[in-house]
């Protein structure tokens, strides 16, 4: 019995209510037993004094007092019995209603531990969360926790599926080429070795990108925030891309921002810009133009990379930031794209509290990629 009470919150609450009820009943009874006869005698004395009935003998008075005591205790016992019965029912209902959400959370957590990540408990809606008690808050927090566990699990599964899918293509090429070489179907010439090398390099890039993405997504990084001249950032960009743009026959315009400064992790912002300008180079035809621009106001520093390249459809604008998404997978393969660059760029911009988005009038109309880094 004691073991059962210890193990069940409803029983513990119920027993504690019961104890309170019994203590109140006993104390009330004891006080009544002591106070009622005295009060009776006092009031009877006052009445006799006022009515002048002093002659009534002690025997009759004692009997009256005894009857009064018995009547009071009878009425008290009935009142206590009825009160206790009602209190027992109410305390049982209250105990159950307090213990029920805790029980539900215990059951849901067990199911989540068994891998059922969609499990949720009943909790107040977000617009009612201001007035909830501790148990209500426990439910709300539990659901938050379950939601983020579910998200992480979905991401983990998706990542595994995506990675194995992405690795399958280069591995198939390498295996096919190796088998062809062994059977003498494929010539052991420079071109064959170049194919093998390109596939191996692509796998290496992919693995490096995945490593970085999983590190960023898991929050395993520390931003090195410093104050720097934006000119420094744009100089790095020019140094890195000038030759490649000349070779591709695309005009690259990088502005001189003057002496504007910003506070951020310079290497991460540089990485974002390199990704955007690198993409503009990949997806713009010879003779095209790519323009970087930068401005600053009280909300932050705004960067944009505008190209006259192949453009994006309305649907692509959202999806390009999704990992492994490539508008034209076969062409992206030729250009060595893994579809992770923009996902990593988005993570870095958001790590700074900023925003990144794409704009385009449609296919063939060029694209604009913009991002903002808040001032502080
Ligand atoms: P990738 O390494 O394949 O370029 P990203 O994540 O950087 O991966 O880009 C995802 C996809 O978005 C690309 O495969 C491409 O289809 C599209 N994309 C990115 N930048 C541009 C651009 N400037 N113009 C047109 N399409 C683009």
Image: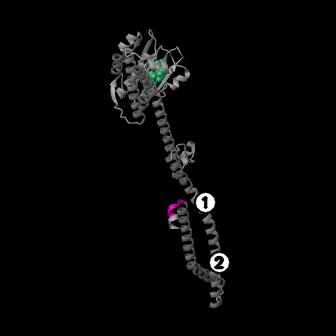
> Which of 161 and 283 lies nearest the eye of the viewer?
161
As for residue 6 lying within the magenta part, the answer is yes
From this viewpoint, is residue 128 visible?
A: yes
- Residue 93 is marked as 1
Which residue: 52% across, 64% down?
Answer: 5
Of residue 346 and residue 285, the one placed in the foreground of this image is 285
> On the rendered structure, is 23 left or right of 371?
right
- Residue 346 placement (x, y as % from top left): 44, 28
For residue 221, what is the image quadrant? top left
**Residue furthest front in the image:** 183
Q: Is residue 228 in the magenta section?
A: no
Across and down, in percent, residue 285 comes to: 46, 11
| Magenta region | 5-9
Residue 74: give its label: 2
Under 8 Å from ligand 1: the CB of mark 2? no
Vertical relation: 44 (above or below) 282 = below
**Mark 2, other Cα within 10 Å: few <14 / some 14–19 / many ≥20:** few
Residue at the (33%, 25%) spot, across then down: 228
Instruction: Say if 371 sits above or below 286 in the image.
Output: below
């Amino acid at each position: 019995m004691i073991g059962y009470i210890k193990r069940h919150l409803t029983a513990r609450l119920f027993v504690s209510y019961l104890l309170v009820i019994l203590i109140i009943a006993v104390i009330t009874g004891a006080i009544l037993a002591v106070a009622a006869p005295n009060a009776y005698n006092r009031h009877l004395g006052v009445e006799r004094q006022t009515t002048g009935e002093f002659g009534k003998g002690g025997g009759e008075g004692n009997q009256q007092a005894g009857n009064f005591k018995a009547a009071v205790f009878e009425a008290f016992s009935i009142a206590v019995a009825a009160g206790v019965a009602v209190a027992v029912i109410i305390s049982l209902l209250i105990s159950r209603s307090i213990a029920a959400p805790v029980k539900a959370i215990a059951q849901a957590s067990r199911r989540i531990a068994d891998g059922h990540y969609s499990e949720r408990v009943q909790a107040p809606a977000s617009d009612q969360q201001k007035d909830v008690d501790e148990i209500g808050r426990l439910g709300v927090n539990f659901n938050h926790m379950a939601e983020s566990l579910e998200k992480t699990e979905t991401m983990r599964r998706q990542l595994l599926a995506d990675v194995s899918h992405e690795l399958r293509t280069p591995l198939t090429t390498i295996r096919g080429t190796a088998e062809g070489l062994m059977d003498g179907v494929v010539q052991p010439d420079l071109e064959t070795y170049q194919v093998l090398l390109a596939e191996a390099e692509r796998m290496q890039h992919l693995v490096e990108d995945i490593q970085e993405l999983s590190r960023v997504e898991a929050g395993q990084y520390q931003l090195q925030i410093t104050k720097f001249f934006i000119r420094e950032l744009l100089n790095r960009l020019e140094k890195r891309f000038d030759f490649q743009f000349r070779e591709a026959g695309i005009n690259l315009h990088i502005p001189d921002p003057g002496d504007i400064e910003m506070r951020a992790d310079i290497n991460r912002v540089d990485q974002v810009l390199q990704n955007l300008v690198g993409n503009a180079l990949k997806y713009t035809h010879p003779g095209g133009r790519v323009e970087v621009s930068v401005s600053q106001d009280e909300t932050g520093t705004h960067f944009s990379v505008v190209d006259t390249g192949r453009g994006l459809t309305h649907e692509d604008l959202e999806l390009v930031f999704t990992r492994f998404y490539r508008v034209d997978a076969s062409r992206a393969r030729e250009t060595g794209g893994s579809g992770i660059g923009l996902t990593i760029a988005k993570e870095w911009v958001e790590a700074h509290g900023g925003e990144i988005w794409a704009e385009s009038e449609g296919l063939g109309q060029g694209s604009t990629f913009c991002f903002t880094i808040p001032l502080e």
